Image (cartoon, grey):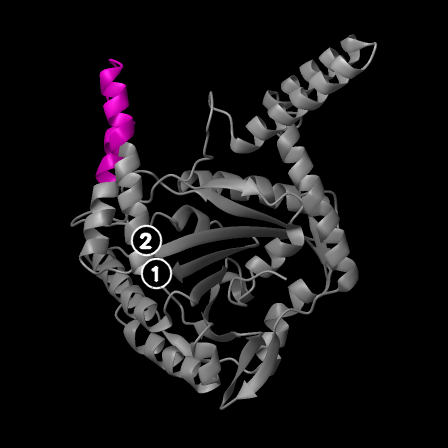
Amino acid sequence: MSSSAGTGPAYPAARHRTVLLGLRPGQVVWAALVVGVSLAVATSTELPAIGLVGAAVGLVGAVVPIRGYCADRWVSTSWWGIGERWRGRRAPDGPTPEPCGEGAVLIDGARRTVVMACGEVDLLLVDPAEQQRRLAALVRALEVLGGALGSAGTLQLVVELTGPGGRSRGYLAITTGGRRAREAAPAILEIATLAKTVLVDAGLTLGPVLGPESLAELLAVARVAGAPLGRTAIVAGAMVHATWWISGWPSRPVEAGFLSPLLLSGLDATLALCIEPLDSHAALRRIEQAQTSAGATVEQRRRGGYRASARAARAQADRDAHELALAAGQHAVELRGYLRARGRDLAELKRVASALEVAASRAGLELEPMAGRQRQGLWSTVPAGGRTW
């Protein structure tokens, strides 16, 4: 994520990576596997036509989607669906809240998580200059918190788009792991105090660390989840839920309030954003490798007589800006996003989901259903540090 003076942040578009003729790696592997098995059958039996027909059907399944999914996606989602039902029988409870000071800490192995409620935020600031000031303050705050958390930490912001009286509620979950977990719970409480201080300039007011009862109430929706309804929905309590992960962010510069169509939609839904600081040295090595690879590709295209496209030039400019920021000592972060819709029954859920997809499209987001992973989707959208169980 990068920003420049006078504009909002620009996010690189997260599209599906392709490796051959526009095919995803899964499609290539599926096609190669099916063709290999079919040819083996064709050469080892007296009916080679069976193998040839199998190869043809497998190739068609690799490239022609059925109900929106090619064969490789059907295999992967079916595998995840089996795992979902197995985890459902195990009835995972997730992290355990333990009292610490005036609040509570969620404990999961070496991870420690504290959760704080966020105060009301004016999502439609009338002054663009104030929007940019708050955005710049938020970027500085994330820099400070990223340095305090290290590469083993996570910041998770969960926004309930409709709360009591139709007002949104927000929660910030801060997670530490690795070395800091061995320093016991007081270390994460110090980071929580730091977060309250540095986020004030960004217009975000944090309440006290939530106690065991409040945490149990927030996590209840994931703990009481029942059996999935098909591949894209799950029952939890008296509601039916469906979760998407944000597979693409706006590829053009956006203003600070670009999520307003989603946040102010009035829909019964939840938005969860996870920010994970990355090791700066490792991130710099990766961007340097990407620069070398991109340079070699450009040279090959030039020798072949192909011109450089505008999209490639934009991607190169983004890589250059990212490398300069890392070389200047800025922290690299990974951003993940999830959206969860809910309804009292499947019919209501479908109406909410349709409206939510339209609102996300207006915000410039690309969504992909967590097919076969709806239980993980529930845990991804509750303030538990962004980890799934």
Q: Nearer the viewer, residue 304 or 60?
A: 304
- 60 vs 155, left or right, is right
Q: Inspect the image, locate mark 2, and give the three-letter code of the amino acid beneath it.
A: Ala
Under tag 1, what secondary structure?
loop
Q: Quadrant of residue 375?
A: bottom right
| Residue sitting at x 57%, y 33% | 26
- Amino acid on which disc 1 is placed: Asp
Q: Residue at x 51, y 30 (%)?
A: 24
Q: Are marks 1 and 2 in contact (CB under 8 Å)?
A: yes
Q: Residues within 10 Å of mark 2 (few under 14, many from 20)?
A: some
Please state the extent of the stretch shown in magenta in the rendering.
295-318
Where residue 181 sits: x, y (%)?
Answer: 47, 78
Q: Which residue is mark 2?
A: 283
Mark 1 sits on what residue? 279
| Magenta span: chief secondary structure | helix
> Which residue reaches farthest right?
46
Q: Residue at x 65, y 42 (%)?
A: 350
Please determine whether, in this image, residue 99 is positioned above or below residue 126: below
- Distance from the alpha carbon under mark 1 to that under mark 2: 6 Å
Instruction: Check the image and report above or below for 233 versus 155.
Output: above
